[in-house]
C-alpha cells in the first residue's frame, strides 16, 4: 500500500531555502522530507531550524513568498528546454 501526501509550498526562509511553509501552514524540511513541529522553548513558541530555536516573531522578518518561476514544475522544465 502506498500513501502519498502532496503539499503546496507557499513561503520559505530567505537565507535557507530547504525549509518551506505550505499553504496549510505546516513547515517541511526539504532535505529530509519531514514535517518540523512547532515547539515551546521557555514561554516562546517557534521552530528548531538547523538545530537553532527561532521564535515565531523572528520568523516573520525572515520569510518570503516563493516566486512563481520556482514553484511551478512546468515552468522549470520549460526554462531548462529553452536554455538548452
Image: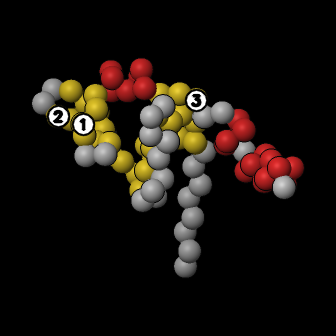
Query: In the picture provided, is 73 more to the left or to the right than 57?
Result: right
Query: How far apart are the two marked residues, 3 and 1, measured between alpha carbons?
Result: 22 Å
Residue beneath disc 1? 53
- State the image coordinates of residue 23 (x, y, percent, origin top left): 56, 37
Query: In the image, which disc is placed on residue 41?
Result: 2
The residue positioned farthest toward the bottom in the image shown: 1
Residue beneath disc 3? 65
Q: Earlier in the sequence, mark 2 or mark 1?
A: 2
Query: In the picture provided, is 6 more to the left or to the right than 60?
Result: right
Q: Earlier in the sequence, mark 2 or mark 3?
A: 2
Nearest to the eye among marks 2 and 1: give it.
Answer: 1
Nearest to the eye among marks 2 and 3: give it.
Answer: 3
Number of other residues with Cα within 10 Å of mark 2, as a class: few under 14, some 14 to 19, many 20 or more: few
Is residue 39 visible in the rendered image? The answer is no
- State the image coordinates of residue 71 (x, y, percent, origin top left): 67, 42
The residue positioned farthest toward the right in the image shown: 82
The residue positioned farthest toward the front in the image shown: 84
Q: Secondary structure at mark 3?
A: strand
- State the image coordinates of residue 78 (x, y, percent, origin top left): 83, 50
Query: In the picture provided, is 56 more to the left or to the right than 62?
Result: left
Query: How far apart are the two marked residues, 2 and 1, measured between alpha carbons?
Result: 8 Å
In the depicted structure, whether residue 22 falls above or below residue 62: below
- State the image coordinates of residue 73 (x, y, percent, origin top left): 73, 50
Tags 2 and 1 touching, CB below 8 Å: yes
Amino acid at each position: 500500500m502506498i500513501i502519498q501526501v502532496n503539499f503546496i509550498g507557499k513561503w520559505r526562509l530567505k537565507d535557507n531555502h530547504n525549509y518551506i511553509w505550505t499553504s496549510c501552514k505546516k513547515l517541511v524540511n526539504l532535505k529530509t522530507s519531514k514535517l518540523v513541529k512547532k515547539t515551546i522553548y521557555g514561554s516562546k513558541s517557534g521552530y528548531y531550524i538547523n538545530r537553532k530555536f527561532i521564535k515565531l516573531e523572528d520568523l516573520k522578518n525572515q520569510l518570503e513568498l516563493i516566486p512563481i518561476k520556482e514553484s511551478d514544475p512546468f515552468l522549470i522544465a520549460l526554462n531548462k528546454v529553452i536554455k538548452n
